[in-house]
Image: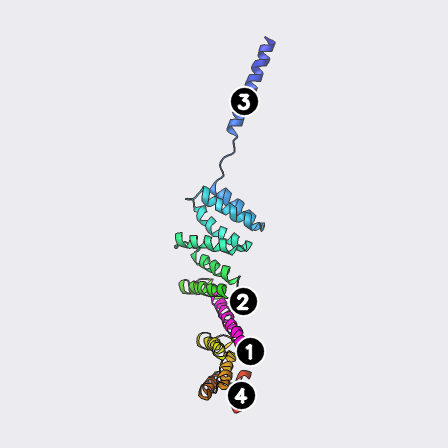
Amino acid sequence: MKYALLFLGLFLTSGMLSGCAATTEPEAETAEDLYNQAYKKLEQTSYKRAAADFEKVELEHPYSKWAVKAKLMGAYAYYKAGDYDSAVIALDRFIKFHPGNQDIAYAYYLKALCYYDQIKPVSKDQGNTEKALEALQQVVMRFPDSEYAKDAKLKIVLAQDHLAGHEMEVGRYYLSQENYLSALNRFSTVVNYYQTTSQIEEALYRQVEIYTTLGLTDEARTAAGVLEYNYPKSPWAAKAARLLKK
């Protein structure tokens, strides 16, 4: 009888333990749990891991409100990681599927930053500068009263100055090679399209210089007149005046 009771006690204990095991299986993580985990990794600067976790929110809970938030935060995590291509892809998805979201202006702005942060020196290809300029202009055009428009306007000025600087860099090279027509085309691009940049004064002078070299006196005087009228105190205007007196 004693052994029977002992066996019965072991049986009951085993059953209770198995019952506990059955009721303590880990529950599936909620969308909010996953989002918070991803956000914590973002705060810890584990940007790649955070981006992966934000994508997990989308995959496992695609219809939750957290999935929408995760789309944008995932793009931000990619941006912070320097993975600009992935960030742009994520932002394009967000913009396409959530055009009325309260954070849509930020999505456009962040996309512009992805290109802006990749701008190369003026001696290099300016493809990203052109993309940044276009994206920044979209921010100003679509969301003129947003908190991002003011900074976008400042960056537009810098991007335009950068593009003008590239034209000047190439123009100077052509000029050094005595390829006057190609050089003139570059300087004229600055005069025609980047009139508000810091490159405009030199561009006008270079026009005077090339026209004078080619014997086109009337054109040289016209360019010098524009330079003198708009920038009378510019050292480039003084140089142009001396050049025409020779």
Q: Main secondary structure of the magenta part?
A: helix
Vertical relation: 137 (above or below) 224: above
Q: Quickly name the residue at label 1.
A: 176
Question: Which mark is first along the chain, 3 or 4?
Answer: 3
Q: Are marks 1 and 4 in contact (CB under 8 Å)?
A: no
Name the residue type under label 3. Met
The single residue placed furthest to the bottom in the displayed view is 245
- Closest to the camera, between mark 4 and mark 3, is 4
Is residue 234 visible from the viewing direction of this image? no
Q: Which residues are magenta?
A: 152-176
Q: Position of residue 199 (x, y in %)?
A: 51, 76
Q: x%, y% of residue 104?
A: 43, 56
Whole-Å distance between the Cαs marked 1 and 3?
91 Å
Circle on res. 124: 2
Residue to which mark 3 is pinned:
16
The residue drawn where x is 47% and y is 56% is 88
Q: Where the C terminus falls, by quadrant? A: bottom right
Kind of residue at badge 1? Ser
Q: Nearer the viewer, residue 116 or 32?
A: 116
Q: Amino acid at mark 4?
A: Leu
Dot 1 crowding, Cα within 10 Å, few <14, some 14–19, many 20+: few
Q: Nearer the viewer, residue 47 or 122?
A: 122
Inter-mark Cα distance, 3 to 2: 72 Å
- Cα distance between the residues tagged 4 and 3: 102 Å
